[in-house]
Image: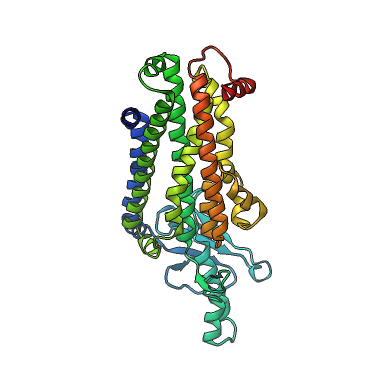
Amino acid sequence: MRKTLIVAKHEFLATVKTKGFIISLILPLLILLPVIFMSGHIPQIASETPESIGFVDETGILQPDGDFIEFGDIEDAEGSLLNGEINSFFTVPRNYLETGRVFLYSTGGVFSAPPTRSIRAFLIDNLLHESDMSETLRDRVKDPADMKSISLNKKGEAEEKNPVRFFVPYVIAILMMLSIMTTSGYLMQGIVAEKENRTVEILLSTLSSNELLTGKITGFGSAGLLQISVWICSGVLVAASTSFAPLFQEIQVSMILILAIPYFILGYLLFAASMACVAAPASTVKDAQQGAMIFTMLGILPMMLLGIIVKAPDSIVARVLTYVPYTSPVTALMRISLVEVPVYELAASLLILIISVVVMIRLSARIFRNAILMYGKKIRIRDILGYLKG
């Protein structure tokens, strides 16, 4: 055990000191700090820009109101737009009542967001004033519905939907899988690098292959846990420092946060053991990466089928992915945010994942022990089967 902890400590410190790992910790903060800054200053910036909208009415039914300024012709409106007096203007042709066509002019380019919603509300308000409707009816036509989406669980209990409640699990699942793949990739590269420079021969002269493999998995796993913890804390910092804070305050510690821990640990152990199976018989990092491609594809499969999972979280595809060990961590967390997943499905998913981890660790230990000192050979299925037989 002491030798295993020494290896784990060495791998952890060696990993967290690398430039790539440090950048992965700092980069989210560098990206999120401008978001925090802009969140507090966007209202001020927006208030400094002109919000007036001009219009040229050839029908004679529109009346200036508030930020809507009427111009006699298009030339006057264009001059005010180019001088920065208004941010956009629209023209209403004579046949507007028959065609409903309106022409909108702005200087923002293709990626700008012209105020179409405000213009529609302005047109509706003027058209309603031309009719003999009551004021209450006019207000209801302008704002026909203030909808609040409520979902019913399997017990028939009503729950008001919070968009953040569905957004947070996706972010946690993506960060978790990204950390798992990155950390297990470090493990694979470390094993192959020590094999290439023959360092592993020196290590195996002082400790067993099982101690070496266990220490590496523990050390890299600790680095991955540190990585995802920093990412989540950065996200909480942004949530508490921006205008989205009230939405996040409604979220309490729920099953998504409780299950994220065992799914991360088990998922990492599974992918780490799988990467070790590929890295041990590989002679170069390139060969190991080619062999690890199948595990990478399985890991990102839930992201590729995200549309199916979101639209039908109780479908056969979503349930099967919940039971498949390599896809269960991400799929289970996504489904929890969408529907009430039965406890037996989550229990079965975790049980299958635990069994898979135990089996894969034993297989990887046997392959690691028999193949780590093999050099100059390409990875072949029959060779791996031979390593398993000893």
Q: Is residue 15 above or below residue 160?
A: above
Q: Which of 261 and 245 is in front in this view?
A: 261
Q: Residue drawn at (63%, 57%), measured in percent from left and top?
A: 312
Q: Is residue 314 above or below residue 374?
A: below
Q: Nearer the viewer, residue 145 or 107?
A: 145
Q: Is residue 372 visible?
A: yes
Residue 344 percent coordinates (x, y): 56, 58
Residue 315 percent coordinates (x, y): 65, 56
Q: Residue drawn at (51%, 39%), measured in percent from left and top?
A: 357
Q: In which quadrant is the C terminus drawn?
A: top right
Q: Residue furthest top?
A: 376
Q: Is residue 76 visible?
A: no
Figure label count? 0
Quarter of the rendering containing residue 65: bottom left
Q: In this view, does 34 lie above or below 125?
A: above
Residue 278 percent coordinates (x, y): 54, 26
Q: In which quadrant is the N terminus drawn?
A: top left
Left or right: residue 10 versus residue 375 is left
Q: Which residue lies furthest to the right in this view?
A: 98
Residue 232 percent coordinates (x, y): 37, 48
Quarter of the rendering containing residue 123: bottom right
Q: Nearer the viewer, residue 40 or 217?
A: 217
- Color theme of the render: rainbow
